[in-house]
Image (cartoon, rainbow, N blue to C red):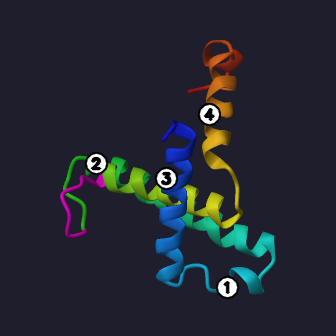
Amino acid sequence: MNTEETINQLASDIFLNAVNKGFHDRDNSESVVDNYARWAANIHGETSELWEAARRGKLEDQCDKDCVLTCEEEELADIIIRALDTAQARNLNIGRAVLVKMAYNSSRPHMHGGKLA
């Protein structure tokens, strides 16, 4: 399996789990905009949790779930999981998109021509 297929399979597995847990029950009854409002808010929420862990100096603490992850690992994983779930919900070839975007970014100048870090 190549990288594109691996990413797409991961997105599919994540989406199936989310469907089985009821996280997509409203998708067909809501507009794309309403779905994106919910999906983007969830990604933002995970990003905010990562920022809070950093701000409080807890990145390397064990997360509050019953697992062996640090807060940093858990929140970064949650961001990726939410993003891949969203991509699969929209039936996107996210594996291809990631590889195309990485190739594009590799061709850009240092700091993309002046963006702040």
Q: Which mark is residue 80?
A: 3
Q: Nearer the viewer, mark 4 or mark 3?
A: 4
Instruction: Name the foreground residue: 110 vs 98.
Output: 98
Q: Which mark is residue 26?
A: 1
* Picture coordinates of residue 71, whole percent (x, y): 29, 55
Which is more N-terminal, label 3 or label 4? 3
Label 4–label 1 contact, CB within 8 A: no
Against 104, residue 32 (above or below) is below
Task: Give the mark nearer the N terminus: 3 vs 1.
Answer: 1
Quadrant in which the C terminus appears = top right
Residue for badge 4: 99
Circle 2 residue: 59
x then y, percent, for residue 45 = 51, 64
Give whichever of discs 4 and 1 has the lower sequence position.
Answer: 1
Picture layout, residue 6 above or below residue 75 = above
Outermost residue toward the front in this view:
1
Q: Secondary structure at mark 4?
A: helix
